[in-house]
Structures are given as C-alpha cells and as structure tokens.
Amino acid sequence: MSIVSKPQRARAGEAGEDRVCRCGAFTLAEVVVSILIITISLAGMIGVYVQAAVRSEYSAYSLSAQMMAVSGMEQCRAAKYDPRGSPPTDALVSSNFPAQVTVLEAGTAGSTVMYATNTTKILTISSNPPMKMVRVDCTWRFPGRGLFTNSVFTYRAANQ
C-alpha cells in the first residue's frame, strides 16, 4: 500500500498522459512531407483529367472530320458516271466538286468554332475498262497541335 495522497496520484497520472500524447504526435516535418505528397498526387490527377479532356476533344473533331470526308465521298458516288452509255455521261470530274470549307460539328459545349476543308481529287485509272480513283481529304487544325488530314478514297467503275 502506498502513502501517496489522491491529488498526487492525479498529478502523476496527468504527467504520464502528457508523455504518452507527446510520443504519439506528428512532427512538423512529417506534416509538411505528407502535405507535399498529397499536393503532388492531386496535381497529377488534375493533369490527367485535363489531358483526357483534350484527347476527348481531339477525338470528337477527328470523327467529325472523318464524317465530313465520307460525306464528300458520297457526293462523288452519287455522280453519274457512264462513259459507254447512250449518250455517254461523266459527271465524275474534279471540277464538279470544288473545295468546301465548313464548320466541324464536334458536339462539344465549347465556344470554339473549328473549320475544315474538303478537297476532292479524281484520277482516271483506266479507260478500258473505265475506272477512276476518287480521293477526298478533309484538312483541319487542332489548337496547339497543328494541321491534320482525314482521307477517304475508293475506286469507281462505270455504272457503279
């Protein structure tokens, strides 16, 4: 049995608790390092998010340019090309398809309007049998990345 009074025991217990709390706390260096790690992690996540948004916008414009090139190809396929018919008709010539500048419809909420140019080239491959090559290029610019071209080509025989 001890002869220590109650108030002395309380003070002894308080001093022991202080010692335990001091040993379990973080130092300033540990707090600074943990904040630095969290900051770097958040900066990385934000950077990845921004890059994903840019790539998504690029993909939307690229798809729109590809559909614009396909639209030009469909116009060429709709042209009458029958050189052996009576009377012979050949509406599949480059002069019937001038360069067209139109807005790329990317479907994004951004206020930036992007333009693209469709150019059509038609080459005669053979006259017997009659065959032509049709190539449609859609040229467009992506901000900060440069000039891009989406191309579609096909071969077209008479009456096809």
Image: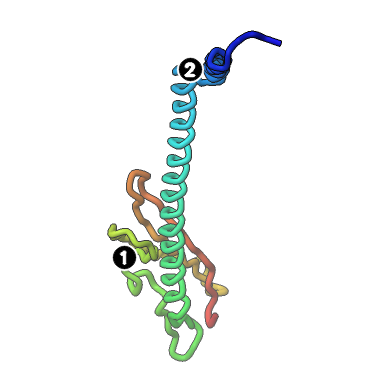
Q: Which residue is mark 2?
A: 27
- Residue at x 53% of width, y 82% of height: 159
- Residue at x 46% of width, y 56% of height: 59
Relative height, residue 132 to residue 37 (above, below): below
Instruction: Name the secondary structure under disc 1.
Output: strand
> N-terminal of the two: label 1 or label 2?
2
Between 57 and 87, the one lying in front of the other is: 57
Q: Amino acid at mark 1?
A: Val
Q: Is residue 9 left or right of residue 107?
A: right
**x%, y% of residue 61?**
41, 58
Relative height, residue 5 to residue 118 (above, below): above
Q: Is residue 160 left or right of residue 120?
A: right
Between 6 and 101, the one lying in front of the other is: 6
Q: Which residue is mark 1?
A: 103
> How busy is the neighbourhood of tag 1: few (under 14 within 10 Å), some, or many (20 plus)?
some
Which numbered mark, 1 or 2, is in the foreground of this view? Answer: 2
Instruction: Name the secondary structure under disc 2.
Output: loop
Q: Amino acid at mark 2?
A: Thr
**x%, y% of residue 62?**
44, 57
> How busy is the neighbourhood of tag 2: few (under 14 within 10 Å), some, or many (20 plus)?
few
